[in-house]
Image: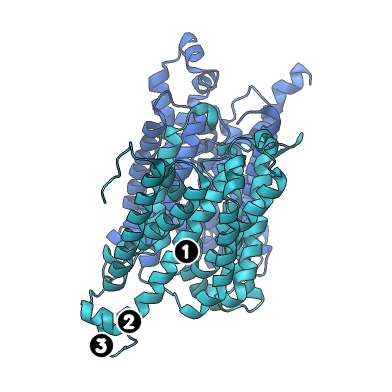
Amino acid sequence: MSTTSSRTRPVAVVAALGAAVVALYLLNLMVGRTFYPLDDVVAVALGADVDGAGFTVGRLRLPRASLGLVAGAAFGLAGVCFQTLLRNPLASPDVIGISAGASTAAVLGIVFFGLSGASVAGLAVAAALVVAAAIYALSSRGGATGTRLILIGIGVAAMLESLTTYVLSKAGAWDLQEAMRWLTGSLNGVGWEQVVPVAVALGILGPLLLAQAGPLSMLALGEDTAAGLGVAVGRTRLLLVLAAVGLVAFATAAAGPIAFVAFLSGPIAGGLVGHGRSLLLPAALVGAVLVLGADFAGQNAFATRYPVGIVTGVVGAPYLVYLIMRSNRTGAM
Amino acid sequence: MSSPAATAHPGVRRSAWALALVGALALLAVLSVAFGARVVSPGEVWGGLAGSTDGFGEAAVAKRVPRTALALLAGAALAVSGVVMQGVTRNPLADPGILGVNMGAALAVVVGIAHFGLVSATSFVWVAIAGAAVAALVVYAIASLGPGGFHAGAATPLKLALSGAAVSAALASFISAVVLGRNDIASGVRSWQIGGVGGADFASMAAVAPFLAGGLAISLLAAKALNSLALGDELAAGLGERVGLARGLASLGAIVLAGAVTALTGPIGFVGLVVPHVVRLLIGSDHRWLLPLSALAGAVLLTAADIVGRVVARPAEIDVGIVTALVGAPFFIYIVRRQKVREL
């Protein structure tokens, strides 16, 4: 690969991903049980009142696709931030139990304390931070190592998931579709009140993370190296973790822990952009593409409508398998 | 329970623990029949055992007896399955839940219910065992198979746990996908899928009993082979053990146990992980003792977990599968913390 192409490649990839996000977003607005042409959809999105399309697109599809967009971007950003910081593709917030913590807290708040809206998101953020701190503390004995942190995270996730299952089974009316949101992630029945907190969180924390791209890539070289290069290691790492956990928690409080999106986005972005580049923006776009694409498939490709998390769960697991098998060659695990 | 002196002869020590476990089991069985949403008097227990269902108490007893029996059986079978899996893979994190074996059985059963009209444990025990076997092979193969070929030693605890988690996640997605399309079976599958012993009845237990007995017998017969395997494949072969055959047979026993239990109770995790480690701490790692004592300890654990689940949230119940996960996951973390990083 020549120098020029490796310099322009990230830009081209980001542009292509951005175009894919826009296309999938519009496709999700147009296609469904009833098809609406592009100009109707755009008119509704811009606030015009179009006969027929006004309700379906404006009230149902627009919030749904918007949540898919912002939640996917949030998961993608947070995932690649964790993976880079911990220097391990497995260390994404959905594998190590941080999404599960946010989900359990959200369910607890809704079922047992009757919370809704911003208070659910707040509780999810607090719980995700506690889980992140607990995993770090539990794995730090004798030097925090990636392997131990990941295994402990898997254990924590298992415990939290069974707690979620229990709380859901105690919910007054068991609704399988609603339960799916908290177990694997779903965009069903979403309204603007769920979209806005995630969008605001992404709007604040996203640029904050993107601004740290330089220090993050230096931290990926190792803490000593980063310190030598003038990075305030402790403060930067804390800032990055807080921002990433916040993104995961807000997205989870609205859409549930959409399976494997945080885990997949970074490596896919890495494959597209190439090594030695900041993956933050590409991973955010890949996350949005994954969620919008998976929700489109789940809604339209099968006889039964499947929540987005089931589609990403089926797609994501083989990638984890591939990662394990590849590591047998490189001896990375 | 008094702890036998550490200096005692190992045989004495083991016998003492065996007795202690039998005593605990008997006590828990009585408690399990007496306690629940309604606490019944000894007289009512006796009446219920004698077959009367006239009073509320006696009716409760009549429901709790099969439930207790199922908890005992399932706990014993899962624990033995865990011992064998840990022995065969020489891996401290092996467990029917973590290896995805229970999930494999669960998916097979759910597909059987949804598409082949299976209705009871009697008819889906074969399906469950087949599903368990496929999941076990897939997970173990993923963990040990690379582009370079199959390496039996390549399956480190991390890789085994991860491939189990990945396969479980995929299987769970498939289960949800099957169930979501079928509202008619959703509630039945859901209560089964959490993992519990509440719906126990003697008819389905009797249907699955031969499988449990067979799996238990194979596992116990494999005790000596598991002791040899613990020394490493080469030493085991040097001792005259046919390593591949021993591994295959022992695995078969473990899979039959896990699959048959899952057919009855739904997936219950962590019993097979926790019990072998605790029993090893008590009596050492000789499988000839480890297997039977783990069976006892597994029965103790699951019965106790079921009682706890019935008592703490009265009048509601917490399914035993949730109690074992809440107890077992911290134990999993404890084992991970204790291991040297190199061995992970």
Q: Quadrant of residue B338?
A: top left
Which residue in the protein does label 2 denote?
A: B49
| Amino acid identity at mark 1 | Ala
State which tag comes first along the sequence, 2 or 1.
2
Q: Where residue A321 sits: x, y (%)?
A: 65, 43
Dot 2 falls on a residue whose secondary structure is helix
Q: Is residue A206 above or below residue B175?
A: above
Placement of the C terminus of chain A among the 4 image quadrants: top right
Q: Secondary structure at mark 3?
A: loop
Chain ID of residue with mark 1: B
| Amino acid at the residue labelled 2 | Leu
Q: Which residue is mark 3?
A: B55
Tell me the amino acid under the disc marked 3. Answer: Gly
Does the residue at mark 2 contact the one at mark 1 (Cβ under 8 Å)? no
Query: How many numbered tags mark residues here?
Result: 3
| Colour chain B appears in | cyan
Asked whether the residues under marks 2 and 1 belong to the same chain, the reply is yes
Check the residue under mark 2 and report the chain it is in: B
Determine contact: label 3, label 2, CB under 8 Å. Answer: no
Which residue position holds label 1? B74
| Nearer to us: label 2 or label 1 | 2
Nearest to the observer: residue A195 or residue A256 = A256
Which chain's residue wears label 3?
B
Mark 3 or 2: in front is: 2
